[in-house]
Amino acid sequence: MHNDWTHVPVDYSDVLRRAMDSLFKTFENFSEGTFIVDKEARVVWINKRYAARFGFSDPQEAIGRDCEAVIPNSLMREVVTTGKPILLDLLETDREPLVVTRLPLKDDFGQTVGAIGFALFDEMKALTPLFSHYSRVQQELIATRQSLAQARRAKYTFASFVGTSAASLDVKRQARRAAQVDSPVLLSGETGTGKELLAHAIHGASTRAARPLVSVNVAAIPDTLLEVEFFGAAAGAYTGADRKGRVGKFELADGGTLFLDEIGDMPLVLQGKLLRVLQEKEFEPLGSNRIVRTDVRIIAATSADLPALVASGRFRADLFYRLNVLSIHAPPLRERAGDIEALVYAMLEELSADARPRHAGQFVLHDDALRLLAAYSWPGNVRELRNVLERAVMLSDSEHIDARALGAFMGTASAVASREPAGVAEETGESHIMSYAEAMGGFEKRFLAEALRASGGRVAEAAQRIGIGRATMYKKIVALGIEV
Ligand SMILES: Nc1ncnc2c1ncn2[C@@H]1O[C@H](COP(=O)(O)OP(=O)(O)OP(=O)(O)O)[C@@H](O)[C@H]1O
Ligand SMILES: [Mg+2]
């Protein structure tokens, strides 16, 4: 019977056979490559051109090999395993990518017995606009990933933690031990005592060092945005400024370490969600139906008294115990005055190399200057010491710094922040008339300290009550040396 499809009844199996024949021929003619694998994803047939493209001058040489050994990045194994087609995909090759289509081959019982793949467009002339867009996006992605990887590498090592006092050696010993294991770490200590430095060092010495270290400063992000910051959101999931969707820090840190700074400021609701994610090791980004599995090591830090927050019901006890598996306390600088000299010289070297390259390493502190530093209470700890030295390096006329010169650089900081009301000027017997800036600094310090006291030491609450941002509040606490 010659087919004349205008006549009924049609022989459907004939139609089907013809359709399949011509489909295959058309694909074969137009495609740059065709190949077939068996149900173990081994090549059973490949056309000459496709084989040649992947370096097999004789197609026979490719027969019997695993598909990936012939065509790197091939997904034919997935097709034979799932029995589902991949209708349109881009296959990366060492030359330009190919547009490919992959179909399962089934037997009469519907069992997958193999798969057939076509590489539809070589050079992709027909798809130039689409492809140039794709390759631009791909390039951007590679560049962004590289710069992010750079930024996410640990900034500090244990060697960056300067100090040979017993307290410092103990902290370093505990931190080194923490780097050997994978359990959560809770770093506590006043502001500026090196908690962030330790978090970097622990990550950098851990088995996760080659993976990202991602930091979230809980205090610096408004409560309403924290959840998205942590877990991400699907496109259009929320009507914030960012409608494109967002990858959360948990996902970014996958395989690496998530550093949760100022954990004490985390709202209770989010504490509950965080606990659940830590227990279940999976979460769903906001507005998505996607389950994301996480493999993240948590290092949390707090300058607040977390047990006190637990006692007053502002921090969940269960989350506290979960985070507090290894706890490391960074002692305040005033309790390890023996470290000050080593810190001073390490920092002077670094600071002067930046600010005055020709004078690098030439700064010398007189003994009376060192004594002045040792006697001071350092409410802002090592950060404050660094700030004083930075000022000295920038403003000092000479590389030889004595107590008198240094006192000037400690300036407002010592006048308003010293634990004893007597400032340097009074010690030296000079009558002291406050400058406007000093007076305002003093007022600001008392005002903020009072707000903190009224809020039970909780920074976020105090900031909210007096109408300033949390991040600003933290900066002021450090700058003015307020004890939290
Ligand atoms: N032991 C140390 N040796 C050298 N530098 C240090 C040391 N401790 C802290 N620093 C420096 O002091 C500054 C503050 O340290 P870091 O940011 O780690 O403190 P922090 O405890 O996280 O403070 P905060 O609670 O305010 O966030 C940084 O510049 C850091 O490099
Ligand atoms: Mg910090």
Image (cartoon, helix red, strand yellow):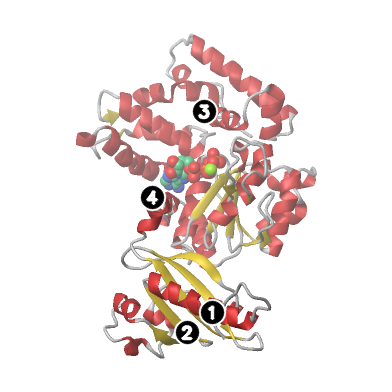
- Pick the residue in front: 333 or 478: 478
Q: Which mark is residue 18?
A: 1
Circles 1 and 4: CB distance less than 8 Å? no
Residue at 58%, 47% (x, y): give it.
246
Residue 381 percent location from the top left of the image: 50, 38
Amino acid type, callout 4: Arg
Name the residue tied to disc 2.
37
Amino acid type, callout 1: Arg
Q: Secondary structure at mark 2?
A: strand
Of the two numbered discs 4 and 3 on the same chain, state the one appearing first in sequence. Answer: 4
Name the residue tied to disc 4.
136
Of the two numbered discs 1 and 2 on the same chain, state the one appearing first in sequence. Answer: 1
Q: Which mark is residue 479?
A: 3
Residue at 60%, 40% (x, y): give it.
243
Amino acid type, callout 3: Ala
What's the CA distance linking mark 1 and mark 4? Answer: 41 Å
Circles 4 and 3: CB distance less than 8 Å? no
- Pick the residue in front: 446 or 424: 446
Amino acid type, callout 2: Val
What's the CA distance linking mark 1 and mark 2? Answer: 23 Å
Circles 1 and 3: CB distance less than 8 Å? no
Residue 227 percent location from the top left of the image: 67, 46
Note whether 195 is above or below 104 in the view shown. Answer: above
Res. 263 visible in picture: no
Between disc 1 and disc 3, the foreground one is 1
Residue 402 is left or right of residue 273, and the answer is: left
